[in-house]
Image: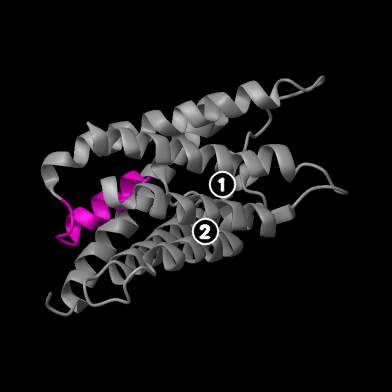
Amino acid sequence: MKKQLAEFIGTFWLVLGGCGSAVLAAAYPDLGIGFVGVSLAFGLTVLTMAYAIGHISGCHLNPAVSIGLWMGGRFDKSELVSYIIAQVLGAIAGAGVLYLIASGKPGFETGGFAANGYGEYSPGGYSMTAALITEVVMTFAFLIIILGSTHSKAPKGMAGLAIGLGLTLIHLISIPVTNTSVNPARSTSQAIFAGDWALGQLWLFWVAPIIGAILAGIVYKYLSPED
């Protein structure tokens, strides 16, 4: 269970660091870090964990990543379900700790709690169709980055940097559209605390990333040079 525990810890850190930056640090006009800071925070969580647990579990931290790596021939199907369970539980634990911290301030209201949404719950008011396209394309790009940078012929030791910066760029593009998911575990953890509307829209943030990941796995398997 070492791999699954590593995935639990890594996904816990991704949610606490990424969503925590949005809930705790981006909420203040004068002191807040803004969209750029939140984007960087998500990238840094993956970058730090890539070097901390990458050699243990591969540092997926995301059901879509595990599925994409499986489709790309880089991950054993027998471990897929246990990885996804560990990731979702780690994300929920991270959101739970974030809630305990955030609720320690007088007048705290859960609000959106960094949840993902479309329509009236999109930061920029984008439609469901726009959200669906965004999440599919961004996840596709994320998996292409992951599959390419971790290939045996890629520069050694640079995968964590490429993946972390890739996730930062993805957030810079798509926070205004969906608050950026590309990660069903991250979306699930925040939806639980945000309430009915977030749970009602959660389906999109499972379906779209998984579609994007599957497509990326198929495409990169075709593009990939032989090991």
Query: Which residues, given as a range, are shown in magenta?
Result: 58-75
The answer to whether 1 appears left or right of 138 in the picture is left
User: Who's the residue at 78% across and 23% down the image?
Assistant: 105
Q: Is residue 207 left or right of residue 129?
A: left
Which corner quadrant of the image does residue 168 belong to? bottom right
Q: How far across and down, in percent of the image, does residue 102 sit?
A: 69, 27
The answer to whether one can see residue 127 in this image is: no
| Residue 144 falls inside the magenta stretch | no
Image spot of residue 81 (x, y percent): 21, 36
Depth check, front residue: 122 or 31 = 31
Using the numbered discs, state the Cα–Cα distance from disc 2 to disc 1 in whole angstroms: 8 Å
Residue under numbered circle 2? 130
Q: Quadrant of residue 144?
A: bottom left
The residue sitting at the right extreme is 30
Residue designated by label 1 = 118
Amino acid type, callout 2: Ala
Whether residue 178 is visible here, answered yes or no, is yes
Q: Do the residues bearing badges 2 and 1 touch, measured as CB atoms within 8 Å?
A: yes
Per the image, label 2 sits on a secondary structure element best described as helix
Q: Amino acid at mark 1?
A: Tyr
Q: Nearer the viewer, residue 180 or 124?
A: 180
